Amino acid sequence: MKKILMLLTLVALASCGDDNDDDNDLLNEQLPQEEEVTDFSTRLTNSLLIAGRRCEGGETTTDANGATVTCDRDQWLITVDNVNTCTPGGACTEIGVVPFIAELDREDRVSIPEYTFFEIDPLSAVTPAQDSTVDNYLVRFDINDEEATVISK
């Protein structure tokens, strides 16, 4: 009887507290190897490059509506460069492309032990072309090499 009472007490205590639905935050929590990656850049075609740089907090950019927005720590400045082109020899045009702020959301539908995959989720306003482009790609973190690459879905 004493064990049953103790078990019921523990169950009651475990159910106390608020449920602020942090399940999604736990799912998106990065592994230590992923935290080592501070940037990535992948040229997918001669006219498309997707790059990201982890924010330290306080970085600013201009969103698609022209507003200045600030990037918080561990958010990402993502550049979708479909303006510049590169030749097969590696010579590229150098027109400036403004990044947008995003978070990387873990994609658990793809399961390969040495990699983790993330969708790019824009937090600041983006153009329809940027939104459509990032919907087609994932950021793949290589757990062994502490690097990230953009891949097609």
Image: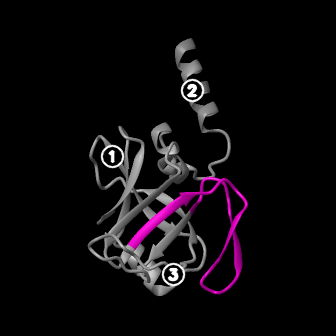
Q: Amino acid at mark 1?
A: Tyr
Q: Nearer the viewer, residue 104 or 149?
A: 149
Residue 115 is tagged as 1
Q: Amino acid at mark 2?
A: Leu
> Earlier along the polypeptide chain: callout 1 or callout 2?
2
The answer to whether residue 30 is magenta is no
The answer to whether residue 65 is magenta is yes
- Which residue is denoted by mark 2 in the rendering? 8
Q: Residues within 10 Å of mark 3 (few under 14, many from 20)?
A: few
Where does the image place residue 90, in percent across and percent down from the top left?
A: 33, 70
Q: Is residue 119 visible?
A: yes
Where does the image place residue 39, in percent across and percent down from the top left?
A: 50, 55
Q: Are marks 1 and 2 in contact (CB under 8 Å)?
A: no
SS at badge 3: loop
Q: Relative to residue 110, is residue 79 depicted above or below?
A: below
- Which residue is denoted by mark 3 in the rendering? 95
Q: Residue at x 35, y 37 (%)?
A: 144
Which residues are drawn in magenta? 49-76
> Earlier along the polypeptide chain: callout 1 or callout 3?
3
Q: Residue at x 71, y 77 (%)?
A: 68
Q: Is residue 28 left or right of residue 15?
A: left
Q: Residue at x 68, y 41 (%)?
A: 17
